[in-house]
Amino acid sequence: MSTKTRSAKPYAIGAGVVAAAGLLAFASYTATKPGDRDAPGAAAAASAPASAAAGQEGVYPELERLARRDAKDGLATGRADAPVVLIEYADFKCGYCGKFARDTEPVLIEKYVKKGVLRIEWRNFPIFGEESEGAARAAWAAGRQGRFWEFHRAAYAEDAKEKGFGKDRLTALAREAGVPDVARFTRDLDSAEARRAVTRDQEEGYGLGATSTPSFLVNGRAIAGAQPLEAFTAAIDAAAAKAGR
Protein backbone atom coordinates (compact mmCIF):
# COMPACT_ATOMS: atom_id res chain seq x y z
CA MET A 1 0.00 0.00 0.00
CA SER A 2 1.70 3.17 -1.23
CA THR A 3 -0.55 5.66 0.45
CA LYS A 4 1.36 7.94 2.76
CA THR A 5 0.70 7.85 6.50
CA ARG A 6 1.51 10.72 8.80
CA SER A 7 0.28 12.57 11.84
CA ALA A 8 -2.01 15.23 10.39
CA LYS A 9 -3.19 18.26 12.28
CA PRO A 10 -6.92 17.84 12.85
CA TYR A 11 -9.20 20.40 11.27
CA ALA A 12 -12.13 21.91 13.14
CA ILE A 13 -14.77 19.63 11.64
CA GLY A 14 -17.25 17.44 13.45
CA ALA A 15 -16.83 13.71 13.97
CA GLY A 16 -19.83 12.94 11.77
CA VAL A 17 -18.30 14.94 8.94
CA VAL A 18 -15.00 13.12 9.30
CA ALA A 19 -16.84 9.81 9.01
CA ALA A 20 -18.65 10.96 5.87
CA ALA A 21 -15.51 12.41 4.30
CA GLY A 22 -13.74 9.13 5.10
CA LEU A 23 -15.40 7.73 2.00
CA LEU A 24 -12.70 9.65 0.14
CA ALA A 25 -10.02 7.44 1.62
CA PHE A 26 -11.55 4.08 0.69
CA ALA A 27 -12.86 4.85 -2.77
CA SER A 28 -9.94 6.86 -4.08
CA TYR A 29 -7.42 4.35 -2.68
CA THR A 30 -9.24 1.63 -4.60
CA ALA A 31 -8.80 3.72 -7.75
CA THR A 32 -5.11 4.50 -7.22
CA LYS A 33 -3.48 1.64 -5.30
CA PRO A 34 -0.24 0.67 -7.04
CA GLY A 35 -1.11 -2.83 -8.19
CA ASP A 36 -4.46 -2.02 -9.72
CA ARG A 37 -4.60 1.60 -10.75
CA ASP A 38 -4.00 0.85 -14.43
CA ALA A 39 -5.95 -2.40 -14.49
CA PRO A 40 -9.29 -2.73 -16.31
CA GLY A 41 -12.17 -2.13 -13.93
CA ALA A 42 -10.15 -0.27 -11.29
CA ALA A 43 -12.21 2.88 -11.70
CA ALA A 44 -15.41 0.88 -11.61
CA ALA A 45 -14.33 -0.70 -8.34
CA ALA A 46 -14.20 2.75 -6.79
CA SER A 47 -17.48 3.96 -8.22
CA ALA A 48 -19.91 2.26 -5.87
CA PRO A 49 -18.98 4.00 -2.60
CA ALA A 50 -18.09 7.23 -4.36
CA SER A 51 -21.39 7.40 -6.23
CA ALA A 52 -23.19 6.66 -3.00
CA ALA A 53 -21.43 9.61 -1.39
CA ALA A 54 -22.28 11.88 -4.30
CA GLY A 55 -25.92 10.79 -4.35
CA GLN A 56 -26.66 11.26 -0.66
CA GLU A 57 -28.15 14.35 0.91
CA GLY A 58 -24.90 14.63 2.88
CA VAL A 59 -23.69 18.14 2.15
CA TYR A 60 -21.78 19.44 5.16
CA PRO A 61 -21.33 23.17 5.87
CA GLU A 62 -18.04 22.40 7.62
CA LEU A 63 -16.65 20.96 4.40
CA GLU A 64 -18.15 23.70 2.26
CA ARG A 65 -16.25 26.27 4.31
CA LEU A 66 -12.95 24.76 3.15
CA ALA A 67 -13.38 26.73 -0.09
CA ARG A 68 -10.86 29.56 0.17
CA ARG A 69 -12.38 31.86 -2.46
CA ASP A 70 -9.17 33.86 -2.66
CA ALA A 71 -9.24 35.95 -5.83
CA LYS A 72 -5.42 35.96 -5.85
CA ASP A 73 -5.09 32.17 -5.60
CA GLY A 74 -2.90 31.12 -8.51
CA LEU A 75 -4.03 27.49 -8.13
CA ALA A 76 -7.70 28.22 -8.77
CA THR A 77 -9.81 29.08 -11.78
CA GLY A 78 -13.23 30.70 -11.94
CA ARG A 79 -14.87 33.57 -10.15
CA ALA A 80 -14.16 33.82 -6.43
CA ASP A 81 -17.89 34.40 -5.84
CA ALA A 82 -19.08 31.51 -8.02
CA PRO A 83 -22.02 29.68 -6.39
CA VAL A 84 -20.27 26.28 -6.62
CA VAL A 85 -16.69 25.43 -5.65
CA LEU A 86 -15.05 22.15 -6.59
CA ILE A 87 -11.97 21.42 -4.47
CA GLU A 88 -9.61 18.84 -5.92
CA TYR A 89 -6.96 17.01 -3.87
CA ALA A 90 -4.53 15.48 -6.37
CA ASP A 91 -1.02 14.24 -7.11
CA PHE A 92 0.80 14.72 -10.42
CA LYS A 93 2.02 11.11 -10.35
CA CYS A 94 -1.55 9.78 -10.02
CA GLY A 95 -2.83 8.19 -13.22
CA TYR A 96 -6.50 8.73 -12.43
CA CYS A 97 -5.82 12.37 -11.57
CA GLY A 98 -4.42 12.69 -15.06
CA LYS A 99 -7.49 11.04 -16.52
CA PHE A 100 -9.72 13.55 -14.74
CA ALA A 101 -7.50 16.43 -15.90
CA ARG A 102 -7.59 15.35 -19.53
CA ASP A 103 -11.11 13.99 -19.92
CA THR A 104 -13.39 15.65 -17.38
CA GLU A 105 -11.97 18.93 -16.13
CA PRO A 106 -11.92 20.65 -19.55
CA VAL A 107 -15.63 19.87 -19.95
CA LEU A 108 -16.40 21.30 -16.51
CA ILE A 109 -14.44 24.45 -17.31
CA GLU A 110 -16.29 24.95 -20.59
CA LYS A 111 -19.72 24.08 -19.20
CA TYR A 112 -19.57 25.76 -15.79
CA VAL A 113 -16.44 27.80 -15.07
CA LYS A 114 -16.69 30.01 -18.14
CA LYS A 115 -20.34 30.71 -17.30
CA GLY A 116 -19.51 31.85 -13.77
CA VAL A 117 -21.24 28.91 -12.09
CA LEU A 118 -18.17 26.95 -10.92
CA ARG A 119 -14.82 27.70 -9.34
CA ILE A 120 -12.15 24.98 -9.21
CA GLU A 121 -9.61 25.13 -6.40
CA TRP A 122 -6.58 22.85 -6.57
CA ARG A 123 -5.00 21.35 -3.49
CA ASN A 124 -1.55 19.75 -3.78
CA PHE A 125 -1.86 16.32 -2.19
CA PRO A 126 1.41 14.50 -3.03
CA ILE A 127 1.36 10.93 -1.74
CA PHE A 128 3.71 9.04 -4.09
CA GLY A 129 7.06 10.12 -2.68
CA GLU A 130 9.79 12.64 -3.37
CA GLU A 131 8.96 13.31 -7.02
CA SER A 132 5.33 13.95 -6.11
CA GLU A 133 6.47 16.48 -3.53
CA GLY A 134 8.73 18.16 -6.07
CA ALA A 135 6.00 18.34 -8.70
CA ALA A 136 3.62 19.84 -6.14
CA ARG A 137 6.10 22.58 -5.24
CA ALA A 138 6.80 23.17 -8.94
CA ALA A 139 3.08 23.60 -9.63
CA TRP A 140 2.88 26.13 -6.80
CA ALA A 141 5.94 27.93 -8.18
CA ALA A 142 4.37 28.09 -11.65
CA GLY A 143 1.26 29.53 -10.03
CA ARG A 144 3.33 32.34 -8.56
CA GLN A 145 3.85 33.52 -12.13
CA GLY A 146 0.29 32.90 -13.28
CA ARG A 147 1.09 29.67 -15.15
CA PHE A 148 -0.26 26.99 -12.84
CA TRP A 149 -2.94 25.70 -15.20
CA GLU A 150 -0.50 25.58 -18.11
CA PHE A 151 1.92 23.60 -15.91
CA HIS A 152 -1.00 21.39 -14.81
CA ARG A 153 -1.85 20.66 -18.44
CA ALA A 154 1.75 19.84 -19.36
CA ALA A 155 2.31 17.63 -16.30
CA TYR A 156 -0.90 15.71 -16.95
CA ALA A 157 -0.39 15.23 -20.69
CA GLU A 158 -0.70 11.65 -21.90
CA ASP A 159 2.34 9.63 -20.73
CA ALA A 160 3.89 12.68 -18.99
CA LYS A 161 4.17 10.97 -15.61
CA GLU A 162 6.17 8.11 -17.15
CA LYS A 163 8.96 10.64 -17.80
CA GLY A 164 9.23 11.34 -14.09
CA PHE A 165 9.40 14.61 -12.20
CA GLY A 166 13.07 15.12 -11.47
CA LYS A 167 14.44 18.68 -11.32
CA ASP A 168 15.44 18.85 -14.98
CA ARG A 169 12.03 17.54 -16.01
CA LEU A 170 10.26 20.11 -13.81
CA THR A 171 12.27 22.89 -15.43
CA ALA A 172 11.34 21.55 -18.87
CA LEU A 173 7.67 21.49 -17.87
CA ALA A 174 7.94 25.08 -16.63
CA ARG A 175 9.31 26.14 -20.00
CA GLU A 176 6.59 24.18 -21.78
CA ALA A 177 4.02 25.94 -19.59
CA GLY A 178 5.41 29.34 -20.58
CA VAL A 179 6.66 30.32 -17.13
CA PRO A 180 8.35 33.66 -17.93
CA ASP A 181 11.13 33.66 -15.31
CA VAL A 182 12.59 30.17 -15.01
CA ALA A 183 15.30 31.27 -12.57
CA ARG A 184 12.63 32.60 -10.21
CA PHE A 185 10.64 29.40 -10.73
CA THR A 186 13.66 27.36 -9.59
CA ARG A 187 14.11 29.51 -6.50
CA ASP A 188 10.41 29.35 -5.63
CA LEU A 189 10.34 25.59 -6.16
CA ASP A 190 12.94 25.04 -3.44
CA SER A 191 11.69 27.71 -1.06
CA ALA A 192 10.36 27.27 2.46
CA GLU A 193 7.21 29.07 1.34
CA ALA A 194 6.54 26.40 -1.29
CA ARG A 195 6.97 23.67 1.30
CA ARG A 196 4.59 25.43 3.69
CA ALA A 197 1.98 25.85 0.97
CA VAL A 198 2.11 22.18 0.00
CA THR A 199 2.04 21.08 3.64
CA ARG A 200 -1.03 23.24 4.26
CA ASP A 201 -2.89 21.48 1.45
CA GLN A 202 -1.70 18.05 2.60
CA GLU A 203 -2.79 18.63 6.18
CA GLU A 204 -6.21 19.76 5.00
CA GLY A 205 -6.65 16.60 2.95
CA TYR A 206 -5.41 14.27 5.69
CA GLY A 207 -7.64 16.09 8.17
CA LEU A 208 -10.60 15.06 6.00
CA GLY A 209 -9.58 11.41 6.08
CA ALA A 210 -8.34 11.36 2.48
CA THR A 211 -5.26 9.19 2.00
CA SER A 212 -5.13 8.89 -1.79
CA THR A 213 -6.05 10.64 -4.98
CA PRO A 214 -8.05 12.06 -6.63
CA SER A 215 -10.52 13.29 -4.00
CA PHE A 216 -13.04 16.07 -4.42
CA LEU A 217 -15.49 18.28 -2.57
CA VAL A 218 -18.34 20.02 -4.38
CA ASN A 219 -19.87 22.59 -2.03
CA GLY A 220 -19.30 20.23 0.88
CA ARG A 221 -20.26 17.00 -0.92
CA ALA A 222 -17.53 14.35 -1.16
CA ILE A 223 -16.72 12.60 -4.44
CA ALA A 224 -13.87 10.07 -4.44
CA GLY A 225 -11.94 8.85 -7.44
CA ALA A 226 -11.98 9.79 -11.13
CA GLN A 227 -15.71 9.29 -11.51
CA PRO A 228 -17.55 9.63 -14.83
CA LEU A 229 -18.39 13.15 -15.98
CA GLU A 230 -22.03 12.61 -14.97
CA ALA A 231 -21.11 12.25 -11.29
CA PHE A 232 -19.59 15.73 -11.33
CA THR A 233 -22.28 17.42 -13.41
CA ALA A 234 -24.98 15.96 -11.15
CA ALA A 235 -23.23 17.28 -8.03
CA ILE A 236 -22.56 20.69 -9.58
CA ASP A 237 -26.11 21.04 -10.92
CA ALA A 238 -27.53 20.14 -7.52
CA ALA A 239 -25.27 22.62 -5.75
CA ALA A 240 -26.07 25.36 -8.27
CA ALA A 241 -29.80 24.74 -7.91
CA LYS A 242 -29.51 24.93 -4.13
CA ALA A 243 -27.67 28.25 -4.53
CA GLY A 244 -30.45 29.56 -6.77
CA ARG A 245 -28.53 29.29 -10.04
Image (cartoon, rainbow, N blue to C red):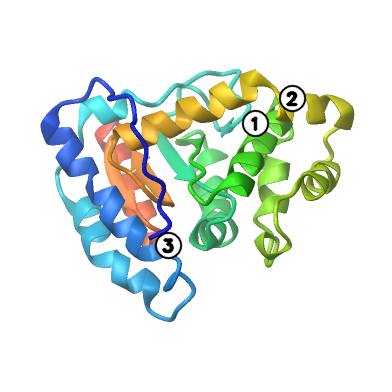
Residue type highlighted by circle 3: Thr
Sequence-earlier tag: 3 or 1: 3
- Residue 222 sits in which quadrant? top left
Residue shown at 40%/52% (left/top)? 3
Q: Look at the numbered discs 3 and 2 and tell me whether their residues touch, using CB distance below 8 Å.
A: no
- Please state which of residues 80 and 33 is positioned toward the viewer in this rendering: 33
Sequence-earlier tag: 1 or 2: 1
- Please state which of residues 97 and 76 is positioned toward the viewer in this rendering: 97
Q: Relative to residue 100, is residue 57 depicted above or below?
A: above
Give SS at disc 1: helix
Question: Residue 37: percent from the left, percent from the top?
Answer: 45, 69
Sequence-earlier tag: 3 or 2: 3
Distance between mark 3 and mark 2 Cα atoms: 29 Å
Q: Residue furthest bottom?
A: 40
Residue 6 in the figure: left or right of residue 200: left
Distance between mark 3 and mark 1 Cα atoms: 23 Å
Give SS at disc 3: helix
Is any part of residue 133 visible from this angle? yes
- Residue 135 sits in which quadrant? top right
Q: Which disc is residue 140 wearing?
A: 1
Q: Look at the numbered discs 3 and 1 and tell me whether their residues touch, using CB distance below 8 Å.
A: no
- Please state which of residues 1 and 43 is positioned toward the viewer in this rendering: 1
Residue type highlighted by circle 1: Trp
Q: Which disc is residue 188 wearing?
A: 2
Question: Residue 165: percent from the left, percent from the top?
Answer: 70, 51
Q: Look at the numbered discs 1 and 2 and tell me whether their residues touch, using CB distance below 8 Å.
A: yes
Mark 3 Cα within 10 Å, few/some/many (few <14, many 20+)? Answer: many
